[in-house]
Amino acid sequence: MADEMLGRLARYLRFMGFDTAYAQGWTDHEVQARTQLEGRILLTRDRTLARQTSGAVGVCATDIEGQLAELRKAFPTIRWEVRPERCTLCNGTLAHWTRAPEDPWPVGVPGELVEQGLALYRCSDCRHVYWEGSHSEKVRRLIARATHPPGA
Ligand SMILES: [Zn+2]
């Protein structure tokens, strides 16, 4: 559960396949109740909320690399890598998708690469289509740098 101030972090966690809810526009009470009900770990920049929520992880850094580095320290046994399992827009689950002839061609999908066997994934909820490489190289490099620092 990412609090309202951690929207970017929520998207990055979804890039890595983590089931990440984003608490946008919720009261502290709602955030706590849903965290508990859904069995989530609360990630928050709000120190008071972190103290009041069992198992919460307080995030101090304001930049995405610093935030990922803090999570790497908080969860040292987790595998940190890009995995096409979660929709970065809505947190729906992704599944392999084969376009049927009657389906409209999704915007931005590189047709010639699909014909060469590029795997496509589609969100079960919002139907957004992803493909290997649709998360830019820049994002992958940032994740690698923040979660696998040299010498760690
Ligand atoms: Zn989606």
Image (cartoon, rainbow, N blue to C red):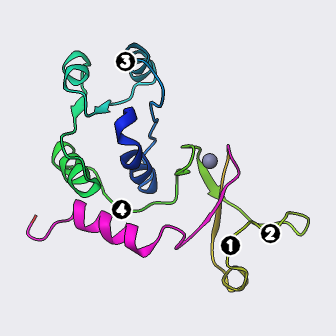
- Is 130 magenta? The answer is yes
Q: Residues within 10 Å of mark 2 (few under 14, many from 20)?
A: few
Nearer to us in this view, 75 or 48: 48
CA–CA distance in space, label 2 to label 3: 41 Å
Q: Amino acid at mark 4?
A: Glu
Q: Quadrant of the C terminus?
A: bottom left
Q: Give the CA separation, mark 1 to mark 2.
A: 8 Å
Which of pointers 4 and 1 lies earlier in the amino acid sequence? 4
| Mark 1: amino acid | Val
The residue carrying mark 1 is 109
Q: Which residue is mark 4?
A: 81
Query: Which numbered disc, 2 or 4, marks the residue closer to the eye?
Result: 2
Q: Earlier in the sequence, mark 2 or mark 3?
A: 3
From the image, state whether disc 4 or disc 3 is nearer to you: 3
Secondary structure under the numbered disc 3 in the rendered image: helix
Name the residue type under label 3: Asp
Disc 3 and disc 1: Cα gap in Å?
39 Å
Position of residue 7 measured from the top left corner of the image (x, y, whole percent) = 41, 43
Residue corresponding to mark 3: 28
Q: Magenta span covers which residues?
A: 125-151
Front position among marks 2 and 3: 3
Task: Give the class, few, some or many, for how many residues have Cα within 10 Å of label 4's Cα (few <14, many ≥20).
Answer: some
Which residue is label 2 attached to?
105
| Residue 40 percent coordinates (x, y) | 38, 29
Pair 3/1: label in front? 3
Along the line of sight, the residue nearer the viewer: 128 or 3: 3
**Is residue 113 visible to the viewer in this orientation of the structure?**
yes
Identify which residue is drawn at 45% across, 52% down.
Answer: 17
Image marks 1 and 2: residues in contact by CB distance under 8 Å = yes
State how far apart marks 2 and 4 are (Cα).
29 Å
